[in-house]
Image (cartoon, grey):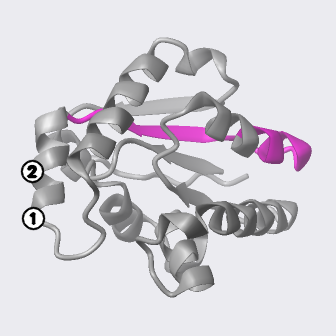
């Protein structure tokens, strides 16, 4: 399991699209669209994550690489994902998008779809910043932190046989 962690606008979805097959990625936005016909419908979040957690468990039970594309900036959200990975005895990697807040806000403002309120991005960024101090204690097998847009662009994903 690969958990993408970072505020909206940090580049998680683009990174996932560039490095993983579409069938490997569980996107909270896409699942909101699936249950409510609108990726921005926050009232569909609980249903979307119920579907995400179910699909994650089914894929991990089959030993399929699965990428969770959501903000995952709060410990409790990551704990649920880690519990599913542990239940299926699968390794868990976090890729943290710790880009500057200004970059996330600028990218968000240039979006034509999936634009988030700037206050929400500031809140997400703050929660990420708080999480960085204890992320290593949460139980991930590996954690990769990307701190700027150039590092994200240059990052490579290497798959190793299980």
Drawn side of residue 95 relative to residue 146, left or right: right
Extreme residue toward the front, this view? 43
Q: Is residue 69 visible?
A: yes
Secondary structure under badge 1?
loop
Residue 83 magenta: yes
C-beta proximity under 8 Å, tags 1 and 2:
yes
Q: Which mark is residue 66?
A: none
Residue 89 magenta: yes
Seen from the viewer's position, the closer of residues 44 and 133 is 44
Q: Residue at x 11, y 37 (%)?
A: 102
Q: From mark 1 to mark 2, how far is it between C-alphas? A: 7 Å
Question: Badge 1 local density, few (<14 within 10 Å), some, or many (20+)?
Answer: few
Residue 16 image position (x, y, % from top left): 41, 63
Q: Which mark is residue 110?
A: 1
Residue 49, by quadrant, is bottom right
* Residue of label 2: 106
Residue 41 image position (x, y, % from top left): 47, 71
Drawn side of residue 7 relative to residue 119, left or right: right
Extreme residue toward the bottom, this view? 37
Residue 17, by quadrant, is bottom left
Secondary structure under badge 2?
helix
Residue 82 image position (x, y, % from top left): 73, 39
Q: Is residue 27 visible?
A: no
Q: Residue at x 56, y 82 (%)?
A: 36
Drawn side of residue 108 relative to residue 89, left or right: left
Residue bounds of the magenta highlight: 82-99
């Amino acid at each position: 399991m690969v958990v993408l962690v970072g505020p909206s606008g940090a580049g998680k979805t683009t990174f996932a699209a560039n490095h993983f097959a579409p069938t490997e990625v569980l996107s909270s936005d896409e699942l909101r669209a699936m249950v409510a016909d609108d990726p921005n419908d926050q009232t569909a979040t609980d249903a979307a994550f119920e579907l995400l957690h179910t699909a994650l468990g089914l894929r991990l039970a089959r030993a399929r690489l699965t990428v969770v594309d959501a903000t995952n900036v709060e410990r409790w959200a990551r704990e649920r994902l880690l519990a599913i990975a542990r239940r299926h005895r699968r390794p868990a990697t976090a890729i943290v998008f710790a880009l500057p807040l200004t970059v996330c806000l600028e990218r968000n403002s240039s979006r034509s779809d999936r634009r988030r309120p700037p206050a929400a991005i500031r809140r997400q960024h703050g929660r990420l910043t708080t999480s960085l101090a204890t992320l290593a204690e949460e139980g991930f097998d590996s954690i990769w932190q990307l701190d700027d847009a150039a590092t994200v662009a240059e990052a490579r994903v290497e798959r190793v046989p299980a």
